[in-house]
Image (cartoon, rainbow, N blue to C red):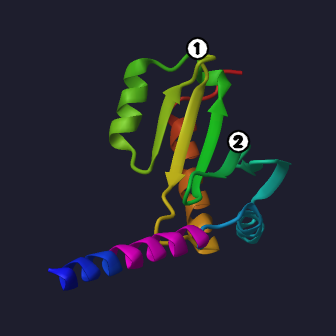
Amino acid sequence: MTRMIKIAVLSTAVAIIAATSNAQSALSLNDIRAAVDSSGYEIVSTAETGIFIEIGGNKVYISVAGFDGDITYVHWHPTLGDHIQPDAINVFNRDIKFGRIYRDADGDIVLQMDRNVTGGATEANVASDLEVMEMLLDKLNTDNPRSN
């Protein structure tokens, strides 16, 4: 019985160490900046908690947050707020993988995509995310043309 308890404690310790090492393998904002640069996207501005980049004429905010450094990509689309119908939001969220849209407290449409970095993330993952975000923005803008 004592041996089983020791094995259980050891297993728990190994799991905690593994979780801690995963958290340490998260990307920093500098790593994300490097991935953005190498992918050919323009960094528009920086903030304490993230960066703004340009993807096909759309500003996207990239931030790192949470215990394990999850990465969030957000685009606010204020020109759609009064024009997109709830049904269109539901169709997008039902049919499109990896991203979602919703109406924020100001009534603006927000496109958001998240990367769970449990197990680590690389600059190549960020580069891939940027390509996916570009496709999501294209889909959103094609289905719901800007009405400026």
Element on which disc 1 rests: loop
Q: Which residue is at the front of the view, 124 or 42?
A: 124
User: Picture quarter containing residue 29?
Assistant: bottom right
**For marks 1 and 2 on the same chain, the one whose residue lies earlier in the sequence:** 2
| Amino acid of disc 1 | Asp
The residue positioned 68% from the left and 50% from the top of the image is: 62
The residue positioned 72% from the left and 21% from the top of the image is: 148
What is the span of residues highlighted in magenta in the rendered image? Answer: 12-24
Asked whether, in this view, residue 67 is left or right of residue 37, the answer is: left
Residue furthest left as drawn: 1
Instruction: Name above or below for residue 64 compared with residue 85.
Output: below
Counting the numbered discs, the total is 2
User: Picture quarter containing residue 85?
Assistant: top left
Which quarter of the figure is the N terminus placed in? bottom left
Instruction: Name above or below for residue 23 compared with residue 140.
Output: below
Asked whether, in this view, residue 7 is left or right of residue 37, the answer is: left
Q: Specify whether residue 16 is painted magenta.
A: yes
| Amino acid of disc 2 | Asn
Residue furthest top as drawn: 82
Q: Specify whether residue 86 is painted magenta.
A: no
- Main SS class of the magenta portion in the image: helix
Residue wearing tag 1 = 82
Residue wearing tag 2 = 58
Where in the figure is residue 119, as x and y percent of width and height?
A: 46, 71
Q: CA distance from mark 1 to mark 2?
A: 18 Å
Asked whether, in this view, residue 98 is left or right of residue 55, the answer is: left
Where in the figure is residue 49, as x and y percent of width and height?
A: 75, 48
